[in-house]
Image (tube, helix red, strand yellow):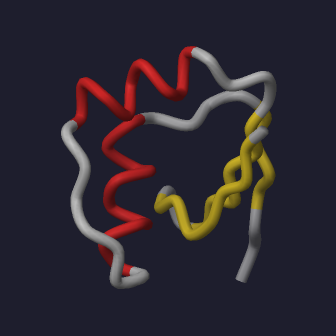
Amino acid sequence: MEYKLIDNQLKAEDFIKLKVSAGFRERPAELVEKALKNNLYDVVAVTDGEVIGTTST
């Protein structure tokens, strides 16, 4: 299995999907997009074209 780490490419739909899969409630996409625009930096872990993890500041 190969993993890639990608800087500053976090999309709202991927963030929401990860949060929901971890048991958190779904947030409105427009609020998540606004929050991501205010990020200083994020890293996304991807395997087989699917986002499997993220971190942001």
Quarter occupied by residue 30? top left
Q: Nearer the viewer, residue 47 or 8?
A: 8
Q: Is residue 26 above or below residue 32?
A: below
Percent from the top left, x then y, of residue 50? 47, 61
Q: Nearer the viewer, residue 5 or 1?
A: 5
Left or right of 34, for residue 53: right
Left or right of 2, for residue 23: left
The C terminus lies in quadrant:
top right
Left or right of 56, for residue 16: left
Q: Is residue 37 above or below residue 23?
A: above
Percent from the top left, x then y, of residue 47? 61, 67
Count of marks placed on residues: 0
Q: Nearer the viewer, residue 33 or 47?
A: 33
Residue at the image position 73 percent from the left and 44 percent from the top: 56
Q: Is residue 40 above or below residue 17?
A: above
Percent from the top left, x then y, of residue 41? 79, 29
Residue at the image position 43 percent from the left and 66 percent from the top: 18
Q: Nearer the viewer, residue 1 or 53?
A: 53
The N terminus lies in quadrant:
bottom right
Residue at the image position 75 percent from the left and 67 percent from the top: 3
